Amino acid sequence: LPLAVARAGFMAHGLALAHTHVRLNATQIHNFVRQKLDIPDDPANPAHRRALLNRLNEALESVQPVPVDFGALMGDPSTAGRLMMTVAQITKHIDNQTPVRFLIAETETGYTLLAALWAALHYGVADKVEISPLFETEDALSNGDRIVEEALRSPTWRAYVQRTGRISFQFGYSDSGRYVGQLAATYLIERLRLKIHDLLVRWNLQNVTVIFFDTHGESIGRGAHPFRMAGRLSYLSPTHVRTEFANTGIACREETAFQGGDGYLLFGTPHLAGATLATIAENLFNPLHQEGDPVYEQPVFSADFFSSISEGMQALVEDPGYAALLGAFGPALIDRTGSRPPARQSAEAATSTRLTHPGQLRAIPNNAILQQLGWCANTLQGLGAAARRHPETFESFNTSSPRFHRALDFARHALTSSDDRVLQSVINLLDPSYWLDRATAEPKAPRQAAFLTLMQDLEKLNLSADLRTMFRRIQADHLALREAWEDAPHGAPLNRALHAIRVALIERIWILACRIPFFMPRGGFNRDVMMQQILRLEIPAVLKEMVHIFPSGTVASNLDFYEPRGPREQGIYEREHREIFVPMQQMFALLREISVGVMHDIGAFG
């Protein structure tokens, strides 16, 4: 048995520990091909698309492979060139049997796929890579069939697919849910899978294995179904889609990732791992039973309902107050998520520390921050407007459609983990008027002065008006949902209590900061910079500066200079450290511990 298991692992993974998977963005592919083929036009411009596709198809017919060595790899200035040559070296020196998944993020045109194929042919590895578009934006999910068909019109692309016997697609629940909402994302992903099926039939590619690779993380906001593993698998891989592929005889390979702490959790003990694998096997090998479902029988309502959710979420994403909300405290509320920085690299991010659009933030911290702010917007926003359009049909589908009910499970869990009063308390905290009201009612002069100071510093952040407008948008949609869905659950008391304690800690940290003595600017760090950082809860960075500006103790306090010992003065800033800086550090550590508690209460273990 151990030998059989080892052989199975070797046959599945080749010489690697798992399926090798590399990734870059569409723009990096475009830049590489533009330089190599002297194609200056922008593929994103529809006016140029047909001419660009024709130009690239001509290049595909005449491309000749070039030799690759480590010197060429090290000397190539382009990201796409280096990555494709890395794949070439892997196939040459390590494993020439197992294909490498070549994932291209932000794919929004078939030109991207053909450009990647040209690069693969140029370096002689086309038959060793699975070129896989990542569909995650609203445009890509809505128009993915056009993207695929643009590639299929190319004889070279069809020959590549026939030769390798595979065609691969990836769907990102994290980013798609971030832009169109989780409930709309599941519908758009399923619809795109069905359209891909129809395209393969139309182009007579039924003999090709289709690979669907889904990424979903440890939380409802990233596409992980909140209840049983069986429901999670059925949500990611609807029976309706699998039946369509089975009926036409197209082999469909489905892959999914168990990411973050969620992955460790589900395989943490032999019993858990056995139960997880048994449930996966049950989902895969049990006969498909296609049941009648109103979602498919009444496609007009389904399309309108999920489109309304998508519109509601997209409107929220473009609301300046939403970026202000995500960026007010930003990643300061949470521990580091993964190996990549929370902010995406962009021209705007390079010139400003203030978040101006959710697209500047990565999907994982985006989701985690929403949870910490008490409102799972990427699961809930737009649902109220969609339900209000068809309240009777909404209730009917909720009780009669397994597919619809399974999607609404996300909303049920999100509502138990969300509380509009928590979100409102955060917005109040960032409102200068709130602190002015407290100053007006405060009889003690020192506290009144602190409240007025916070009011003035919050005015400089200039967040309040946008936050209030955004909150009205969220609140209106939430009230519409409550009206249409009478038995919708409410937020849990434990979660509410954790948020309340943390709001009190933030207030205490801010009030303590008002007691920091005056200091001269130090290397661009002055009082205004300090307060702006403290209001954004960048406490570790501030305390690091405070250690240098207000040193405690003397360097020579414990040294012996071999002469009669003179007096050792105690640090003149001991009181500031004892009464201000140390308590701020302790309260910030507790604030972060509460964030972990909120995550676990929601069920986000990553």
Image (cartoon, rainbow, N blue to C red):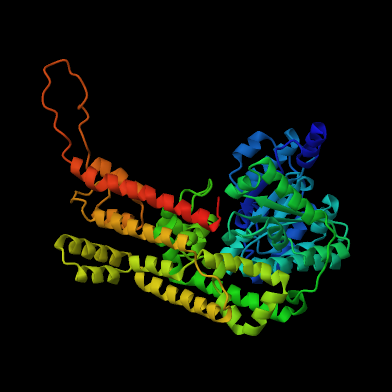
Q: Nearer the viewer, residue 327 or 25?
A: 327
The quarter of the displayed image where residue 435 is located: bottom left
Residue 297 versus residue 268 in the image, above or below: below
Query: Residue 53: where, in percent of width, then height?
Result: 72, 63
- Quarter of the N terminus within the rendering: top right
Q: How many marks?
A: 0
Residue 280 versus residue 327 in the image, above or below: above
Query: Residue 571: where, in percent of width, then height?
Result: 18, 36
Q: Is 245 left or right of 341, judged from the image as shown?
A: right
Query: Residue 271: where, in percent of width, then height?
Result: 69, 43
Query: Residue 79: where, in percent of width, then height?
Result: 60, 47
Q: Nearer the viewer, residue 65 or 162?
A: 162
For the point 54% across and 55% down, the residue is 364
Q: Could one spot residue 541 in this view of the protein?
A: no
For the point 73% across and 78% down, the residue is 299
The quarter of the displayed image where residue 308 is located: bottom right
Q: Residue furthest top?
A: 562
Q: Could one spot residue 456 in this view of the protein?
A: yes
Q: Is 351 left or right of 341, judged from the image as shown?
A: left
Q: Nearer the viewer, residue 436 or 158?
A: 436
Q: Is 532 left or right of 174, judged from the image as shown?
A: left
